[in-house]
Image (tube, rainbow, N blue to C red):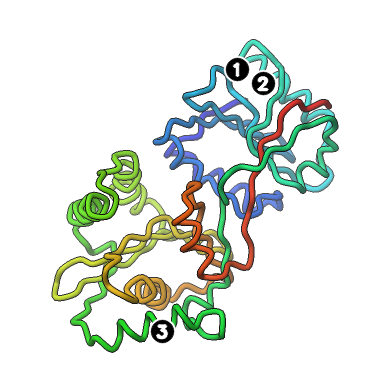
Amino acid sequence: MIEDLHWNNYLELNDYLKNNNFNFDYFSTIQLIQWQYYGSKFKFHKLDQVVIFYIKIKEFKNWKLFNSFYMEGFNLEETIKVIKNDLNILNNDNDIEIIDFSFQSIKDWKLENYQLIQSNYISNYIYNLESFKTFSGKKMVKKRNHLNAFLKQNYNVDVQNLKEANFNDIIEFTIYLNNKYSNETRKNEIQIYKEFLFNQYKKDKRFNGTVFYIDKKIVGYTFGFINKNIYEIIIEKAEKDIRGLYQFILKNNLLFHDIKCELIDREDDLGNPMIAKSKHSYHPIEEVKRFCIKKVKW
């Protein structure tokens, strides 16, 4: 049965994929659910050993195969039959065009005569979590220097559990930052943050976050989700003019909540070179690249 991905089922589906040995790599439905505010819709079809995702972007006329996550030994031929039937139901056309796939998927699915196009963004930046708690080692020396510069200022810093904060103040701070640094409110982003803070946060204890104040004024906050062995950072916001503040927030959020995951996922860079440069500067241990595939023959 084809189902819509929405705010009431995305976590259940995420846990199903994470807990049943699917090749789910670093992707999460927490990322996908946010894309709906940028014009993307998702549907999925759960089989015994495969979960198939379909996407419709506002620029597209038809639904397209987005990706499929599968267990070892899944039945490829039967899965392809299901995909063709699903697309026929969704579009009245079973012509298959794939929007997002990985190299491993190409190998496992035995694709032939395909055209591979790399997306212009990295979908996931993966880091060793311990490195954010200490900023130790040669690779982190610049980040450590920024952190030490912040500490030397002896700011009057208060750290608060995000659950105890005034969410309206958080949203107002976000709007203020967006207008200050990008001259735009970013309404789509604000909608996402409101949904997470006002509706999703209280639904699952794995969501957590921290607010940081200097002289009782909000200067930054972060919000994340414990996704098994990965701590997925959903939101990071801070005053850019205060040297070392970002490093202080990254480190102290992990310490405040005693996050013990092995890895951190700081999600995508939106194809923005400045965001990509910043995320590269923390030396990810893996960057997950995504690809468009066209003219598939099965």
Check if mark 2's residue and mark 1's residue have beta carbons within 8 Å.
yes
- Residue 57, compared with residue 157, is above or below; it is above
Q: x and y percent of residue 290 in the render?
A: 64, 45
Residue 146 seen in the current view: yes
Most foreground residue, 150 or 207:
150
Most foreground residue, 55 or 268:
268
Q: Give the residue type that dot 2 points to.
A: Asp
Q: Give the residue type that dot 3 points to.
A: Asn
- Residue 208, compared with residue 191, is above or below; it is below
Q: Give the residue type that dot 1 points to.
A: Leu
> Would residue 34 appear left or right of 43 to someone viewing this image?
left
- SS state under label 1: helix
Separation of disc 2 and disc 3 at Cα?
A: 54 Å
- Residue 3, compared with residue 18, is above or below; it is above
Which part of the image, by quadrant, shows the N terminus?
A: top right
Q: Which mark is residue 145?
A: 3
Residue at (62%, 58%) from the top-left corner? 287
Q: x and y percent of residue 165 in the render?
A: 22, 62
Instruction: Single out the mark in the foreground, 2 or 3.
Output: 3
Separation of disc 2 and disc 1 at Cα?
A: 6 Å
> Would residue 222 appear left or right of 121 to someone viewing this image?
left
Residue at the disc numbered 2:
86
Q: x and y percent of residue 171 in the render?
A: 23, 51
Residue at (75%, 33%) from the top-left corner? 115
- SS state under label 3: helix
Residue at the disc numbered 1:
90
Residue at (66%, 36%) from the top-left corner? 292
- SS state under label 2: helix
Q: x and y percent of residue 141 in the render?
A: 49, 83
